[in-house]
Image (tube, helix red, strand yellow):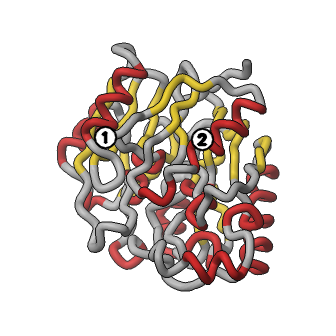
Amino acid sequence: MKTLSGLNEYGALKVVAVRPPEHAYVSDEKVADEWERLRFYSAPKLGPAIDEHKMFTDKLRASGAEVIMLGGDDALTLDSIYARDALLVSPKGLILCHMGRKGRRGEPAVNASAFEAAGYPVLGTIEAPGTIEGGDIIWLDDHALAVGEGPRTNAEGIKQLQDLLGPDVEVHTVPLPPPSHPEDVFHLMSMISPLDRDLALIYRPLMPDSFVNWLEARGIGFVEVPEEEFIPMGCNVLALGPRNILMLDRLPETKARLEAAGCEVDTYTGDEISRKGEGGPTCLTRPLVRGT
């Protein structure tokens, strides 16, 4: 069995999984059938999406990461391009989510089957009535994680997660604000992205004081996303390594603030794979192995 290691969000990315548009969007007919129901801003265009995703994964590989390409299945929707959400990583193996969005509940088993075939162990499953999604989970290190409690992750799901992880892992619960529509997504990673062991990008107006205090007690400082770049997903950035950042293009002030904090920043075009479905680079990726 392969080992899941580097349980953090900033270490050098070693192994990461993605699902390309060919296996998530599939066809123009599938896009037309699903995009409004799934509350995409508009219908993604399959051809340009494939081009965007290839350039995105090329950047992952250029950073030194092995990229696992997830396949398709009839149980998947357009949302399955956001590979982070269906599974969690833990020291003892992968955890299958019971997803808050009902239409995505076939996705964890499909992804887990691919990872098991690649040699990665499965620890367990979150069961109903618990719900949990990967975008609500942030590992700080092997012994501490934050989990957002909100529309996609509930208290029962968090309890089951703590039971699976055991007493050696501190689980800090972060209350999340309700979205404007019950089917809209607002994950913990909508308002925070770790950049390094001691630095995180945050949208301060939505961060509970208890969470800020918990992070500061661990020696973590902050770069703040400006108001005008929060809705366009300025807070959703992917660390390819410590202070080595990949983010959406056309977010100039956030990029400037990251660079002022000593980050090396690269950008990608995500009009079809990110903006229309409101899923940034962390959403598009399921990191499996990072450096410590």
The secondary structure type at the circle numbered 1 is loop
Estimate the x, y position of residue 55 in percent, counting from the top left.
78, 66
Say whether residue 241 is visible.
no
Q: What residue appears at the point 76 percent right and 57 percent down from the top-left corner? A: 57
Q: Is residue 219 above or below residue 224?
A: above
Q: From the image, which quarter does the C terminus lie in?
A: top right
Q: What residue appears at the point 32 percent right and 35 percent down from the top-left corner? A: 158
Q: What residue appears at the point 73 percent right and 49 percent down from the top-left corner? A: 70
The answer to which of 116 and 214 lies nearer the viewer is 116
Estimate the x, y position of residue 197 in percent, counting from the top left.
48, 36
Amino acid type assigned to the residue bearing label 1 in the image:
Pro
Q: Which mark is residue 240?
A: none
What is the crowding at mark 1: few (fewer than 14 residues within 10 Å), some, or many (at least 20)? few
The secondary structure type at the circle numbered 2 is helix
- Could you tell whether 131 is left or right of 63 in the image? left
Q: Is residue 155 above or below residue 223?
A: above
What is the crowding at mark 2: few (fewer than 14 residues within 10 Å), some, or many (at least 20)? some
Amino acid type assigned to the residue bearing label 2 in the image:
Ala
The answer to which of 168 and 182 lies nearer the viewer is 182
Q: From the image, which quarter does the N terminus lie in?
A: top right
Residue behind mark 2: 109
Residue behind mark 1: 129
Q: Residue furthest left?
A: 209
- Could you tell whether 14 is left or right of 35 in the image? right
- Sequence-wise, the earlier of marks 2 and 1 is 2
Q: Residue furthest front?
A: 74
Which quadrant would residue 48 be assigned to in this image? bottom right
